[in-house]
């Protein structure tokens, strides 16, 4: 008989950076548990009950969820403390980001329960909250997708903010010029709205072409070019708003896309109103995420684009035109950012205000990093930032004692936490930001 060698399980070897991050996460969980216990468990007022609406008021078929906010806060604090102990003792390994997301979900749930219980309303529409999250995530997701397209071919696009702002201005201007009372309807919005979106895409393409020319042909620092484009677009749109839109209000009243409920699936409780009763730009965002995911990882174009971003010399050796791919992808990214800009005007309010993008392009860059340069990850990160933005809006309705200035910080606070590395280190494409000189 042959002896069977005993199997030895090797412990996972962690780098000093991973050990340090694991320690910080453990301390974070414990601090969150203490805060939940102090602020939400002992801080509930009245009878401490909160009601979360899981359906629209016009659809009473799905029951609401009522619970004791203080009791739930005690449970959340206990779970967070346990997570902190496990994290400090041995960590969660590759599941650390999932556990982190779960911890923030628990913290948010306890926070919303406390805010609802202490408010005079006593109830909170979760469906409305998630519906707003989807809507608010659209420009961030589209900005992140624009960054993915650019950085996959090693071009850093800091100018996403300017592309969003320029697209928003041109979209409402074109839609206002073409809008008529008897305009034909298509997919819930006047045709003028679609032409405005097309004009916004063209604006993004032009701005991205400028970025590509200076970055690829003249090899100017990509960060500097992006900052210049942002400043130029902000100044130009502010000037034209004062000189053109203020004196001609008819040019600042474009068509607005209406919500369209998808047949059958739009009637599903909870899920239907959130995902399948949105505007055309929201549906277009979902389609773009799926299409770019397939194209980047299942087509020849995607393979060559990723090769250009990782090792342009090797790609050039096998016959890939590095310059052409960089021009093409950067301009495609600008067009996607233009759609995100159109969301601000013809996609929501139907008018343009100075600097109305309010830093969403920079948050989109953070979402791209959070999503690890992947379209699905970018959309997931966009939903996180959209949730923070929606939370700020909904907490104002609940009239919480938190100052409005602090509520306005929520989306940017989430951005800082992501960029600071709380979700772990993300590796960009190897040649990101490096100009290519053909030998």
Image (cartoon, rainbow, N blue to C red):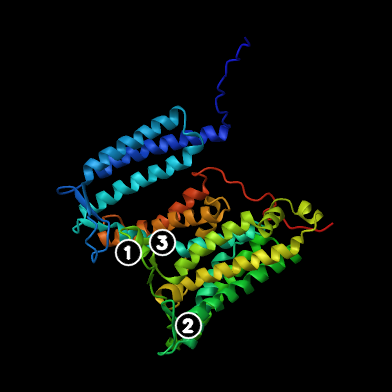
Q: Are marks 3 and 2 in contact (CB under 8 Å)?
A: no
Task: Kindly state the secondary structure of the residue where label 1 is placed.
Answer: helix
Q: Are marks 1 and 2 in contact (CB under 8 Å)?
A: no
Residue 190, by quadrant, is bottom left
Nearer to us in this view, 91 or 66: 66
247 vs 124: above or below: below
Q: Disc 3 or disc 2, which is closer to the eye?
A: 2
Q: Disc 1 or disc 2, which is closer to the eye?
A: 1
x 44%, y 32%: residue: 87
x 71%, y 67%: residue: 214
Whole-angstrom CA distance, mark 3 to mark 2, is: 24 Å
In the picture, which quadrant includes the N terminus? top right
In the picture, which quadrant includes the C terminus? bottom right
Residue 334 horizontal/vertical position (percent): 60, 68
297 vs 249: above or below: above
Residue 285 horizontal/vertical position (percent): 49, 65
Nearer to us in this view, 158 or 265: 265
Q: Residues within 10 Å of mark 2 (few under 14, many from 20)?
A: many
Q: Disc 3 or disc 1, which is closer to the eye?
A: 1
Residue 170 horizontal/vertical position (percent): 53, 79
Q: Residues within 10 Å of mark 3 (few under 14, many from 20)?
A: many
Query: Would residue 162 be seen by someone viewing this image from the given angle?
Result: no
In this figure, which residue is indicated by the disc labeled 3? Answer: 134
254 vs 331: above or below: below
x 62%, y 72%: residue: 205
Q: Which mark is residue 191?
A: 2
Whole-angstrom CA distance, mark 1 to mark 2, is: 27 Å
Whole-angstrom CA distance, mark 3 to mark 1, is: 17 Å
Nearest to N terminus: mark 1 or mark 2: 2
Task: Kindly state the secondary structure of the residue where label 3 is placed.
Answer: helix
């Amino acid at each position: 008989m042959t002896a069977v060698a005993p199997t030895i399980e090797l412990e996972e070897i962690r780098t000093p950076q991973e050990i340090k991050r694991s320690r910080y996460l453990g301390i974070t969980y414990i601090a969150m548990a203490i805060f939940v216990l102090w602020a939400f468990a002992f801080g509930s007022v009245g009878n401490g009950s909160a009601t979360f609406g899981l359906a629209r008021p016009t659809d009473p078929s799905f029951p609401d969820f009522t619970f004791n906010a203080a009791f739930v806060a005690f449970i959340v604090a206990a779970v967070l403390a346990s997570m902190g102990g496990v994290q400090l003792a041995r960590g969660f390994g590759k599941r650390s980001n999932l556990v982190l997301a779960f911890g923030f979900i628990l913290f948010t749930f306890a926070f919303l329960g406390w805010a609802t219980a202490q408010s005079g309303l006593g109830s909170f529409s979760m469906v409305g909250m998630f519906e707003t999250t989807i809507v608010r995530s659209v420009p961030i997701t589209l900005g992140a997708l624009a960054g993915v397209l650019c950085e996959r071919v090693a071009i850093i696009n800091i100018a996403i903010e300017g592309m969003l702002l320029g697209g928003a201005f041109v979209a409402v201007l074109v839609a206002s010029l073409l809008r008529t009372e008897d305009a034909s309807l298509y997919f819930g919005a006047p045709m003028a709205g679609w032409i405005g979106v097309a004009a916004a895409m063209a604006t993004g393409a032009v701005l991205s072409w400028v970025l590509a020319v200076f970055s690829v042909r003249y090899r100017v620092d990509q960060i500097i070019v992006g900052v210049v484009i942002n400043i130029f677009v902000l100044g130009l749109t502010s000037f034209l708003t004062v000189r053109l839109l203020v004196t001609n209000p008819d040019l600042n009243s474009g068509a607005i896309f209406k919500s369209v409920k998808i047949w059958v699936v739009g009637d599903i409780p909870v899920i239907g109103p959130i995902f399948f009763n949105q505007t055309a730009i929201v549906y277009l965002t979902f389609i773009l995420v799926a299409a770019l995911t397939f194209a980047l990882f299942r087509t020849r174009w995607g393979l060559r684009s990723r090769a250009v971003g990782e090792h342009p010399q090797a790609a050039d050796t096998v016959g890939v035109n590095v310059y052409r791919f960089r021009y093409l992808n950067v301009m495609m990214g600008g067009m996607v950012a233009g759609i995100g800009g159109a969301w601000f005007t013809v996609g929501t309010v139907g008018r343009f205000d100075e600097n109305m993008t309010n830093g969403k392009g920079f948050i989109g860059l953070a979402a791209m990093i959070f999503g690890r340069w992947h379209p699905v990850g970018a959309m997931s990160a966009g939903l996180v930032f959209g949730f923070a933005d929606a939370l700020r809006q909904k907490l104002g309705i609940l009239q919480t004692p938190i100052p409005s200035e602090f509520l306005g910080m929520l989306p940017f606070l989430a951005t800082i936490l992501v960029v600071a590395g709380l979700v772990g280190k993300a590796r960009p494409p190897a040649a990101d930001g490096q100009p290519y000189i053909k030998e």
